[in-house]
Amino acid sequence: MGVSDYDETIGLADLRGPANDIRLLQAVLRDRGVTDIVVLADGVAGGVRPTRAAILAALRDAAQTARADDFVYVHLSGHGTQQADPQGDESDGLDEVFLPADTARADPGAGVIPNAIVDDEIGAAVDAIRATGADVWLVLDSCHSGSGLRAASPRAAARFVDPQTLGITATRSAVAEAGAVDHAAPDLPGRYLAFYAARSNELAREVDLAPEGATEPQWYGLFTAKLAARLQQEAAPSFRQLFQAVLRDMNDASVPGGARLQTPSWEGDLIDAALFSGERAEGRRRFSVRGDQLSAGLLHGLGNGSLVALYANPADPEEARLGFAQVEDAEATLAFLRPVAADCQPAAGAFCARAGALPPQARFAQLAARPVDLRIAIAPPVDLLTGERLGSAHPAAAGLAAGIAQGGSAVAGFELALDPDSYEIETVWDGHALWFGYRASLGAQPMGLSWVPEAEPLAPLLERIGRAETLARMLGALVGGGSILNPNPVALTADYRPTRIDDLAPVGAGVSPVRECRAALANVMGKPAERLEQRASLKQCDQVYFGAQGTTAGARDVNRIHIDAQFCIHAEYARIEGSTAPHPLGPEMTICSDCPGGYSAGEERVFLVVTENAENAEALNLEGLVENCGAAAGGTRGTAQRQTMSFLGRIARRPDTRGSFGAVGISDIWVEETGWTVLPREQAFARAGH
């Protein structure tokens, strides 16, 4: 869908690039074997005029014809702007809108642009397609916001319309882009990915890409042109690598200077899937390199001493590496590189010898190995009933000792140890299974992660525990590090809505937890949520809510990292822009001791990580990068098993803090922590006097 021809009588200028965008994409898609292409574009042969009704009808048709496992690509090129958000679901108080060909001027005082397509409508259309089981990739090449035209080359123009031109006033904040599918439903069978051409404090550009000496201009949306060029190459195996390549190309010196002021962004759970497919793409994440500067750091698991391989392109095969380097002077989202030889073996507290110079053509780095500098201690098991330590010949004790002796690695960045005196993880034996937990029992009830000797391998569970504890320890080292001069720019809240104990099934009733919680929550939905206190005791079907609201103008990336009772890591991301309205930080969490997947009582922790948004760099979205359980660990959303290493590395040992003057380090990250105990059902009833 491309809109070039607007009503100039209302001050809405035509665009020159969208028609070329659509022609280019048609050719690229056909070359990739796509035959089912619907075109809504003016100036394109066979294209339908892209009015509001036509665009929404085409999206409805896609939802009606799509089937499970189909892949649907939706592209929008044209003018964009903002208007007031009547629903109150945008953190900056503004809706992003796409302007179709029949956009009109608003009547005085209306506040809404006639025929504009609001981001919520696009999101609902995408969700309708996903409801069929189809995956959706949305690309939006238009401005979402801006403060007027910046100085730009005569060969560059903006795809932005000032709201006042269309008769409305939209108070804008200089913040980052909110996304047209910002509130996409998380539980639909189909997945989604959205690429946005620019953030909302930037202008999406269309550029004359005609070569020097050409007699006719060749206007294209800059983002669309760079995206199409990369798709033609068939180079990047995953959407993430495609995005990284396009981001690099957007900053190429051949792009007119003013146009390089836009920064693309993405959201969605298909980022690590293969192009035009829901299949997982092989290959690790690569990070941008400029000279000796690496656009990644401790939050990406790249601490001091980490060894990286260097590449010219994000999609080059492993064997195309140009050399190796070690990370030094690592900060939260930034680090520097020193060249080393290929035989460098990273060690804690020491660097390999510098070797030569960084290859001048190196533009991307990929993790190769990390120093093993974190020790995670596990207590020897004790009997749940007697409290006595198991003998070394006991099958559970012997199996644990053998598993710990084999656990940890240079890639994972941690080692495991059996320590009866100073340990992080308790273990208890209930006569059938060995249980692991920050607290592995409550009363006579075991809690946490269970392992049955000889029934399943122990190594994957120890790996899960190691990654979760490494993450928790390093994030914990950053908690409360702010100062009065440098407070967290995002106000974070944690609330919960308790269910009534009388609405829960008695012990051993065998009721479906889904049905149980639906009924229990229905009886408390009208009641206000309560503040969640630190280390609260929660029970089956209680709900927890997290929220975030900016306290100053600007944009921040916020990640909610949840480590559950079974040491599984879950990540939810939100971009918080401005300070107009609160924003939910991930979906509500329904607590369960008896979950659809089985028993899951125990200690749980949540870390809320706030980072400043960096221009011309990928947003810090940790979804798909830190998970260590199920499909998210190695399937649908990336290669987290190989990437989630000593997350934040050596930062706990650093003497400088965020509030210290003159310190080079972690001034762009704030971490808050909360946690609770999920009570076993028996304990919840006992505490209520039942």
Image (tube, rainbow, N blue to C red):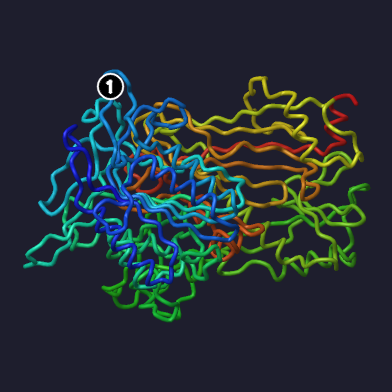
In front here: 184 or 391?
A: 184
Residue displayed at 17% across by 48% down: 157
Q: Quadrant of residue 223?
A: bottom left
Question: Left or right: 680 with respect to 574?
Answer: right
Question: Left or right: 308 with respect to 624?
Answer: left
Give the crowd class for mark 1: few <14, some 14-19, many >=20 residues within 10 Å: few
Question: Left or right: 283 with respect to 540?
Answer: left
Where residue 596 sits in the image (x, y, percent)?
A: 77, 47
Q: Quadrant of the C terminus?
A: top right
One can see residue 394 in this view: yes
Q: Is residue 16 above or below residue 527?
A: below
Q: State how many labels appear.
A: 1
Question: Element at badge 1?
Answer: loop
One can see residue 622 in this view: no
Residue type highlighted by circle 1: Asp
Q: Is residue 132 above or below residue 537?
A: below
Q: Is residue 218 above or below residue 206?
A: below
Outermost top residue: 109
In front here: 69 or 446?
A: 69
Where residue 200 sits in the image (x, y, percent)?
A: 32, 40
Residue bearing mark 1:
107
Where residue 16 sits in the image (x, y, percent)?
A: 19, 52
Where residue 193 sits in the image (x, y, percent)?
A: 47, 53
In front here: 507 or 331?
A: 507
Q: Quadrant of residue 241?
A: bottom left
